[in-house]
Structure formats: C-alpha cells, structure tokens
Amino acid sequence: MRKVAVIGAGITGLSAAHYLSKHENVEVDLFEKSDRAGGKIKTHKQDGYTIELGPESYLARKEIMTELAEEIGLGDDLVRNQTGTSYIYVNDKLSPMPKGAILGMPTELVPFLTTDLVSARAKLRTGFDFIKGPIDIYTDISVGKFFRNRVGDEMLENVIEPLLSGIYGTNIDELSLMSTFPHFKETEETHGSLIKGMYRQKKNASNPNARKQGQFLQFRNGLQSFIDHLLSFIETNGVNTFFKHDVESITRDGSKYLMRVNGESRVYDNIIVTTPHFQYKRWFQDLPFEYFKHMGATSVATVVMAFEDHQVENDINGTGFVVSRKMDTSITACTWTNKKWAHAAPEGKALLRAYVGRPGDYIVNEKSDEEIVRLARKDLDNIMTINGEPEFTIVTKLEHSMPQYKVGHKAMIDGIHDYMAENYPGVVLTGASHRGVGLPDCIKQAKETVKSLI
C-alpha cells in the first residue's frame, strides 16, 4: 500500500486527494492547518444573498472544473453568468467593451473604429499589428512589452491592461507572458498578426445558431458548495482528512519521507505540497529556493455592498466594469453582482462588489475595513449614482493572496521542479504559486501532479 500525504486543503489539495483516491492500493492523508477546507474560497449567505468573499467564478472554457463538478454530482448546480456588456472606466467615464473583443483585442472592425476607449491615433497604431510580423524573444517577455510592441501604449493601458490586471496581481510591465498568456505568442507566431489570428480562432469556434452565453460558471449555492461536496466525496472514497493539523517538518529517510505533524511522526512514500510558496522554507530550508524567497504576492480586498434596488441608479445592461490604471481610484473593478448572477441577491435588491488593491500599494495592509469601505464608496459615487447607505457591507482582506508571475517565472519554476525530482523524488510542489492562479488551473495542476506520481 502506497501512502501519500497532501498538504493543504485548498482547491489544489482537495483535487489532488480526489485524483489520488481513484487509484487502488493508495492511502491518502490530507492535512490542513486551519479548521476549514477551501482556502480563499468562501461563500457567505445572509438575508437571501449568496455572496462570494473570495474567487467569484471560473472561465467556462476551462472545462476541467466542470468535469470535476460533474464527477462529484454537482453538474446540475452549475449556472452561467447572465450576459451583458462589460465596461471600462477610463477618461473619467464608463465605456462599453467593443463587441467581439477578446481580452481587449478587436475582432470586429466597426465596433472598434467607433469605440471611445482609445483615440483615432491609437486605433491607427493598433492596425500596425497586421504588418509587424512576430516579435523575436528567446525565453520570456513581459505582457506589457509584448502588447506595447504589437498595438501601442494607449491600447494596452486603456483596454487590455484593465482586463488582465484583475487576473494576475502583477504590474503589466513585469508580468510574464509565457507563464500567463502563452497562447497570445502562439497566435502571433502562427498567423503573423495577433488580431488576424484571434479573428480566425473566433470564426472557427463560433456557432451562428448558438444563443449568446456568458463566459463564466458558478454554482447556484456558491463556490463553497463545490468545496463541501468535494470534501465529502473524497472522504467517502477513503481519504483521511486532518484539520487543525500543522506539518512541522519533512525529512527524507531513504526512499521514504518522515513528516512531523502536531508533534507526531508519520511516514509517507509521496508528498504533494499545495500551500502558498512562502510556507516552503519551513520544510525545505536546504533547498536553493532563492526565487520563492523573493517572489511577491499582491494583497487584495473585496468590498460587498447591499442596497435596495432603487438606491442604485443603473440601467446599463452590463455585468460590471474594470478601471484603467490611468484613473486615480482605489478600486480596480466593480461587479454589478445582482445583474451578473441571478442567484446572488433577492428580488428588489442590488449587490455591488468592488475590488481594492493594486501591485505595489499598501491600502489593504494599512487601512482598516471602515477606511476601505469609505475609499470604495467615494470611487463608486464618482462613477455611478448611489443614494443612501447600504443595508450592510462586508470587507474581505486577502493578504499576499495573488502570486506575482514576473518575467522568467516559468523557467524558474521548471528548474525548481527539476531540482525536487532529483533531490526529493516523490515530493511535488504545486498550486497557485506555480503554473496558474485560476481555479481550473489549480485543478489541472493537481491532476497532472497525481498522474506524474502514479
């Protein structure tokens, strides 16, 4: 019987335990230092509201999470976001994303030519993408440098950067292209033009008879219901779960590993570590993990505000907006949650969810909850018309929660994994600090990790 320990009961750890439990002759122990599963995922229910305090949803096109939901019996609980245009706050006003744009890149001519998001000069500069040819890079390049080269500064800063900055908490001019959006480079290489390639991909994927659908998926009872079902499912399948159990040390003992947990020693054949990267130094002090010692993580906060529907004057058919970094705001985005998700708020209520925290600022770490609410409300009042005070507010601080994938990240991670395979065979480090921060990305890493071990 092979014994495998999984450290961390976030979505990566739970998924790894699930995929391990499918194999015969494998005993799985899952350890979590806190008293709950799910990590940053947390759903709050109050007065008929279903409110996400951490991640809100996942991209539907990343199907591995949908497949896992179906495996554990939650397929019928999946809901797709209600469609509506997304907006960008730039030049002191809300402007709709041009029809057909994919992560800000235009695929339809007329909507792009008529948008007020960028100037005529910037639109002309964007057109150079058709004739520039591929950019030569040797290992990696920043997302900012890549897009500045292809479509210019204004297009990047007014349209593309606001959309991408909410996914990765890293300065766009330091964010690694090959660790985050390598398909942009592949598209450029294949078609010689990013816009041309994305247009062709969209054309090949489109179904003219299909009803327009939202791009995101959620669960009618919130993301926490997915975590709860997954935890119950793996326990039913024989996974041993241990909460409030702190892994104090990991020592190699021949072909096995000795783990000290809450003062007791346990022996394992394999260990999967899914915790944030700043935990590694507790267990692997001898490793050359200089990269992880200096790898940053951005702190963010969400501010939820609940109102009577009539208090929020918003007749826009949209799901929310992101904010250009050119704007002097504390918030980086706001979701009109009751418009985006039918299950999120009772009839006659409006639910807003603002995001605070940019790379390099200290608002989340230094300001109190009350101060963060005031800052968010000040920005919202400048952008929208909101009358009176909310029924309630909820501030959730996620400190050091978004790992920064800077240029060269992929090469460093590959090197660290090679070192582990050679010096700590059977121990794998994985999770959001490695090869993707989205929920499906974490599940994919867990599945690939288990495949490599078993």
Image: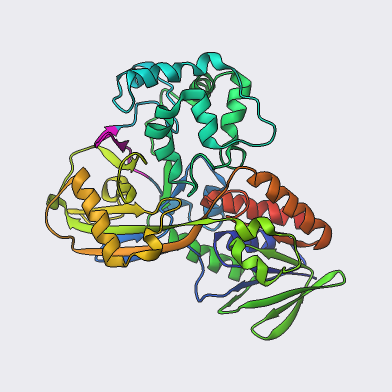
- Front-most of residues 331 and 214: 331
Spot occupied by residue 73 in the image (x, y as percentages of width and height)? 51, 57
Q: Nearer the viewer, residue 34 or 287?
A: 287
Tell me which corner region of the image, top left, top right, bottom left or bottom right, holds residue 313: top left
Name the colour scheme: rainbow
Magenta region, main secondary structure: strand
Residue displayed at 49% across by 72% down? 36
Q: Residue furthest top?
A: 131
Q: Is residue 107 left or right of residue 384?
A: right
Outermost bottom residue:
263
Q: Describe residue 388's horizontal placement relative to residue 166 as left or right.
A: left
In the rendered image, the quadrant that contains the N terminus is bottom right
Q: Position of residue 271 (x, y in %)?
A: 72, 66
Q: Residue at x 70, y 55 (%)?
A: 449
Viewer-closest of 159 and 307: 159
Q: Is residue 55 left or right of residue 342?
A: right
Q: Residue 85 lies in magenta, yes or no?
A: yes
Asked if residue 84 can be seen in this view, the reply is no
Q: Residue 123: image x %, image y %?
A: 38, 19
Residue 151 visible somewhere in the drawing: yes
Q: Quadrant of residue 106?
A: top left
Q: In x, y percent, where is residue 379? A: 24, 49
**Is 23 above or below relative to 414?**
below
Q: Report whether 270 appears left or right of 77.
A: right
Q: Is residue 396 above or below residue 321?
A: below
**Residue at 32% across / 51% down in the picture?**
330
Q: Is residue 274 magenta?
A: no
**Going 49% across and 61% down the picture, which residue do you hit?**
400
- Quarter holding the C terminus is bottom right
Q: How many marks?
A: 0
Magenta span of residues = 81-95
